[in-house]
Every structure is written in structure tokens, then in C-alpha cells.
Amino acid sequence: MKKFTYQVKDQMGIHARPAGMLINEAKKYKSVITIDTGAKKAELTRLMAVMALGVKCGQTVTVTVEGEDEDKALSEIKSFFEANL
Amino acid sequence: MKRIAAKTVYKGIALGKIHVMQKSDSSVNRSRVDDPENEILRVHQSIDVAESQLQELYDKAVKEVGESNAAIFEVHQMMLRDLDYVESIENIIRTQQVNAEYAVAVTGDNFAEMFAGMDDDYMKARSADVKDISERLICCLKGGTSQGDVFKEPVIIVADDLAPSETVTLDKSKILAFVTVHGSTNSHTAILARTMNIPALIGAEMNLDELKSGMDALVNGFSGEFIIEPSEEIREEAKRNIQKEKEKQELLEQLKGKENVTLSGKKIKLYANIGSIGDLGYALENDAGGVGLFRSEFLYIGKNELPSEEEQFQIYKQAVQNMAGKKVIIRTLDIGADKQADYLNLGKEDNPALGYRAIRICLTQTDIFKTQLRALYRAAVYGNLSIMYPMIISTEEVEKIKKITAEVKQELAADNIPYKDVEEGIMIETPAAVMISDELAKMVDFFSVGTNDLTQYTLAIDRQNAKLDPFYNPHHKAILKMLQIVTDNAHKEGKWIGICGELGADPELTETFINMGVDELSVAPSAILKLRSIIRQIP
């Protein structure tokens, strides 16, 4: 199991469109990927659940990756966050 | 005749027959099924159909309103495929042995409620998206096409509220206007209407059951009125106004995209003065090179309290995004004198024009100033924003402003909030500023001359006092000389200068300004094309 934390810089937080892109990214991997705000948790392959976290700008989230391709998944998802959120 | 008051989302006038849009029959019955797996299969087949419809809508919207406005249909496609959403539908069908339509309706309601209950306005608004996809899915299950109504002649669309998918499926050439009972200025419908350049009213208090498609009506986006079966007199007046608009439009078509250049090749920029976010459409429609004066007062006047940083940020952000890379110069709060806000308790003054106003308030009540500056620097990330400070009389004031802006930026950086440095200029509207413009030019990025105040202070004439009209000469040599001094001083320091007062739009002076070397004129949007045609005839 691997994890990283990230502070969201996008002004809108994790809003609909980037959430959608994030889900498409997460679906590429066999690993189970979860996002945790401290208060709530969601699987990163579930769009409405991720949107319902209501992650705002400045909030820190923890992303956990577990599975056979976890190394690759972690580094790709992390770069996605850095580039888009 | 019946007048209905409403809120204008996009100005314009339309006269025609109404078309009342009834929601396609989305009522759903609950019925028991013997073969739940077959229902689930139907759900998946319908999701495929709905998805391809949404893809078509997306492609259509990209062409008509641009990618960023079309993105919502991409999100809708993903919502349709959301695991929780689909699993919830499947579970209801299996556990309750019910029909697919019912399961979709219940699931849609649950998810919509979840979003509606969030403490974030943006997420709250997503509840409408969930309802929209669920209705589409139900329609597909029933074998409907969900492709909107068809009409032979152009109509005024009247509805309770319009989902984005409904507005985009309509044939634009057949729509005169939108009028809805619900909807917000930030709804997709409002944004699309604005982009599509169709007059639109929201919040119209009416009972749709009393209206019938085919009734005559007038939509007046200038007065915010929806008039059912208007009198002959009102119709005639509306027709004249529509004709005027049409003539303007024709002028626009000819000059749109052309340069503001004289026959000998001298160029000048023509920007728009705007007083609210709603005017942005006019600026773009009239081919403004940018916004030369965005009066931020509308955010402060007519309210019970100061606008929050977030509220301001959203407005400024929308402004720079709508102008898509074109310059937007936002003037900081210029309140006081004739513009009052009760909650500020500014008090009565014997001589308000020479009183506590504009930058003087901002430099005294710095918390108000800082909130606005934070919103401005944050919004700058999203486009080409500049800031301009009104009523400057000394270099000390500019130094104070710089100290405050530096603090604001430090605070933003410390909070890890993204912001951007911007061009910052001052208004030249006092004789004092003219006299020291050589020094001021070294401290700022640009000047913008506010000729209304400059004229009033230089000639010592109150423009509101009609008795003084015989003494008032807007082309007074003193003003023109001052403009030349300020222009030369700006250029000596390599800075640019614009005029944003009424004089800037005076066609008799356009040639004089160009010869002086003025770089930009910021005028009412409706004056831009008129000036462009004048400029293009100057030798």
C-alpha cells in the first residue's frame, strides 16, 4: 500500500470536470485507489462520491493506492494532481 | 395585457409568439417486474443511447458556444456512467423487483438531494445536472428521443426552468428570447443565453398554466419586463427599438474585426467602459479591444453589507474569463460623493465632490481596500486583469497603495492562495495629478484620464447645476492642454495613456486625441463602432 498527500490549489477545488478526468485516470489501474479528506473517504473511480467530498481549494487530501500496479498508479495519479489540481 | 417583472440575464428586446415548454412527461409509475435482469439490461442499453445523445450535444455545443461551455455535457456523460449511480439503480431493481424507470427516478432524486444538501454553492447547482441526466435516461427508457420541441416560426421560449441539454437542443435560429420562472444568473442556461446572444429573463413570477403557446408577448431585457399580449402602442415602440438594434447590428457586422486605424496608418485602441458583469456581453458584441474601465461600485451599492472577497473574486474572474485574454482594467472602489452605500455610514458632507470618496476611503478603511485587492489579485490568475486607482492627488498616495498591495500579496502567498501580479495604473482626474504626472509616471504602469472629474475640478463647474451651462465648454483649452501634458509625461517614461471619461467618446475630438498620441480610448460599448468608423476616415 502506498500513499501521498496533496494540497489542492485549484480555486474551484475538485469540481466536476477535473473530478471526471481524475476518475478516467484512476480507472486505468487495477489497484484500488481511495481519496480521503480526513472527514470523508471515496473510491477514486466513483465520480459522484468524489464530487460529494466537496474538496475545496487549500484542503489537503490523502490518496491511497493498493494493488499490483500501485507504484505506477501512484506516480501517475500524483502527477495528475500536480498538473490539474 | 399583463406585465410580469423579471430579472434580466441578457439584455435585448424580442416581440413574438410564446412557446411554453412543458417538461417532457417525466412522471414515472412504479410497477412490479418478473424479470429484473431484463430491466437492468434495458438500463444499460438506455445509458448507451443517452451517452450518444450527450456526445451529439457536446459536439453541437462546442461549435455553438465553445468548449468551456460545452464541458458540462462531458461531465453528464461521466455522471451517467458513475458506478454509485448505476449500482443504486441496479440494487433498487433487484431488491424491490421494480421497473427501470422507477429505479432511475428514485436514484436521481437521492443523488440530487445529496448535492442540494452540500454547503458549497457550486456543488448545490450540480443537483440540477443529476436531475437532467436522470430525466434523459427515463426518456430513453420510454423510447423517447428527448430532442426538444420543434417550431416553424421563431418563438419566445417560456419555461419553469431550462436544463442545459434543453437549451442546446433548441434550434437557435428559431428562438427570440428565454423567459423562465426559476434559474439563477450563474445557471448554465443564463451563461448559454448570454453566449448565444439571446435576450433572457429569469425569476418571472407567472403561472405557466395560464399561458398558452401562440400568445403574443414582448420580452424587454432593458426594463426587465415580460409583457403578455402587449397593447398596440407598446408593440409599435418595441418594433422601433428592435429596428434600432438591427441597424446597430448591421453597422457592427461591417466593422467587426477591423482595425482602429486612420488612413495614414495611426492606430488607437478602443476599449469599453462597463458598470456591471452584465455589460460584458455588450463589450464583446461591439468588438471592444478590452475593458478600459470596469466600475466596481455596482458590487457595493444597493446592498446591506460589504461584498465578500469570494463574491468579488467570482465576478472579477468571470469578467476576465469572458473577455478571454483581452485586457480588463478594474477600477477600485470609487464611492462617496453622489454614490452612497448606507452601511458605510459615510455621512453628509457640505462639499461631497471635494470630500471623502474613492481612494480616500480605501486608504482610511484599509480592510475594505484589502478585501477588494485580494479578490483582484486572485482573479488575475484567470486572465488579463489590470487594476486602476481613482482620485489620486499625490505621490504619497501611490506609495501608500504600493505598501498595501505588497502586504496583500504577502498574505496571499503565506496562505498558499494563487495570485498574479498585474499592471497597475492610476486615474488622472485632478489638476494636481496632471501637474505632477511626470513623477507619477515613474511609479505606475499606465494613466487613464477621467475627463468628467478633471473638467469639473479644473473649470470649477458643477455639472449638475444647469445655471452654469453657458459657462461650460467641454473642449476648453485648459483640458486639452492638460491632456497633452499628461500624454507626454506618460510617454517619456514609456508608459501608456488612455481616456475613460465622456470626452473619450466625443467624435469631434477623436482626431485631436490621435494626434496627441493618446494610446487608448475607453467608451461606452455602443460608441465603439461609431468611433471606429470615424477613425477609419481620418486622414
Image (spheres, rainbow, N blue to C red):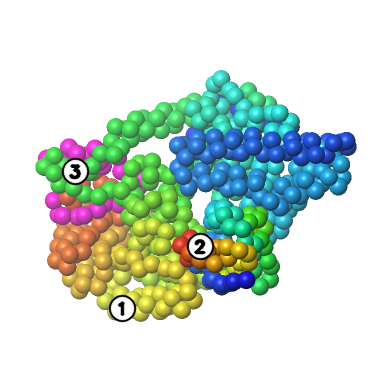
Choose between B2 and B135: the one closer to the eye.
B135
Choose between A72 and A81: the one closer to the eye.
A72
Magenta stretch bounds = B515-539
Placement of A12 over or under B147, stated as above or below: below
Q: What amino acid type should be assigned to the residue bearing mark 1?
A: Glu
Q: CA distance from mark 2 to mark 1?
A: 47 Å
From the image, which quarter does the N terminus of chain B lie in? top right
Q: CA distance from mark 3 to mark 1?
A: 37 Å
Q: Quadrant of residue B181?
A: top right
In the rendered image, residue B514 lying in the magenta stretch gets the answer no
Point 70% across, 42% down: residue: B134
Of badges 3 and 1, nearer the viewer stands 3
Q: Position of residue B34 (x, y in %)?
A: 88, 35
Q: What amino acid type should be assigned to the residue bearing mark 3?
A: Val
Sequence-first tag of 3 and 1:
3
Q: Quadrant of residue B357?
A: bottom left
Q: Which residue is mark 3?
A: B261
Q: Position of residue B276 (x, y in %)?
A: 45, 53
Q: Which residue is mark 1?
A: B399
